[in-house]
Amino acid sequence: MSMPYQQTGNQIDYQEIKQTKADLKAEVHFIGQIVGGLDFQTDDGLFCELAIDCGDGWDLLQPGNNKGIQTQTSYANPGQLFSWGHPFDLHFSVSNISGWPKALLKVWRLDSSNKIDACSYGTALFPRSAGYHQITCETWTPTGENLDLEVRKPNEDLATNTDQFSKFDRSLDWRFQALSFYMENPPRLTTLAPLTTDKGDFARRKILNSISNGKVIIEVEVVMKNFKRLSFSGQ
């Protein structure tokens, strides 16, 4: 068996270790932070959740991160920055660059009565080139004028029952707006499927009506390994 080096006297002569493409694995690090939220017109506290959507060829090497990332609650005057500064470190092993990772963002609002409601949603593709990047993700709020939304019952205890919703059909769309205006109980998505890359959800995405909301600022440093040696390109 050949040795990777030979020792002669007090010196070590290293031999070249040849590796084939089959021995290599492309890897990507996304290291950064969710800086904060901007232009949200509210006096209530806001916090943000970040989930990852990626293709089958992407394996997250820290499995705990696939459960999502959540910031602390921050307060700010309307139009000012809700400062979160929440760090993240995502390390992927890549066998196929199809399905480049995308951030699925959900901004939550905590009001003075300690009631939590989804405030807005957004998506942002992670950068495809190495180096420092700043991402500004525009978010939006659903208006309730479609079949893919459900509204929480006004007297429901969110802390103990977060998944029970009362359903309305398309003929009662006005109730979404009434609950949102009078009860501050905005409509929310029951699933993040319309935000993902699954082609089966494109039809539902087309009928999703929404209004624009604030922005989420993300800073990220991208580190790539073995992309050139494997002739991979993020572009």
Image (spheres, rainbow, N blue to C red):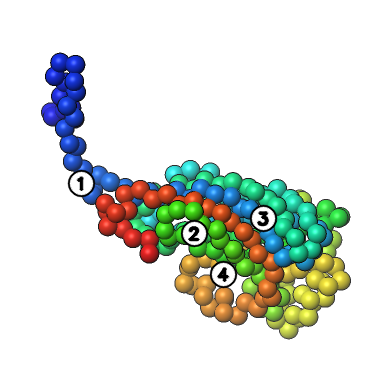
Mark sitting earlier along the chain (3/2): 3
Mark sitting earlier along the chain (4/3): 3
> Rounded to the nearest whole Å, what is the CA distance between mark 1 and mark 2?
29 Å
Which residue lies under the disc numbered 3?
36
The answer to whether the residue labelled 2 contacts the one labelled 4, judged by CB atoms less than 8 Å apart, is: no
Q: Residue at x 79, y 63 (%)?
A: 78
Tell me: residue 143, above or below residue 9: below
Tell me: residue 191, above or below residue 176: above
Tell me: residue 60, above or below residue 12: below
Which residue lies under the disc numbered 1?
20
The answer to whether the residue labelled 4 contacts the one labelled 3, judged by CB atoms less than 8 Å apart, is: no
Q: Mark 4: which secondary structure? A: helix
Q: Residue furthest top?
A: 9
The foreground one among 227 and 110 is 227
The answer to whether the residue labelled 3 contacts the one labelled 1, judged by CB atoms less than 8 Å apart, is: no
Q: Give residue 182's quadrant in the image.
A: bottom right
- Disc 1 marks a residue whose amino acid type is Thr
Q: Residue at x 65, y 48 (%)?
A: 85
Q: Which mark is residue 194?
A: 4
Q: Residue at x 29, y 54 (%)?
A: 228
> Rounded to the nearest whole Å, what is the CA distance between mark 1 and mark 4?
40 Å
Mark sitting earlier along the chain (1/2): 1
Q: Mark 3: which secondary structure? A: strand
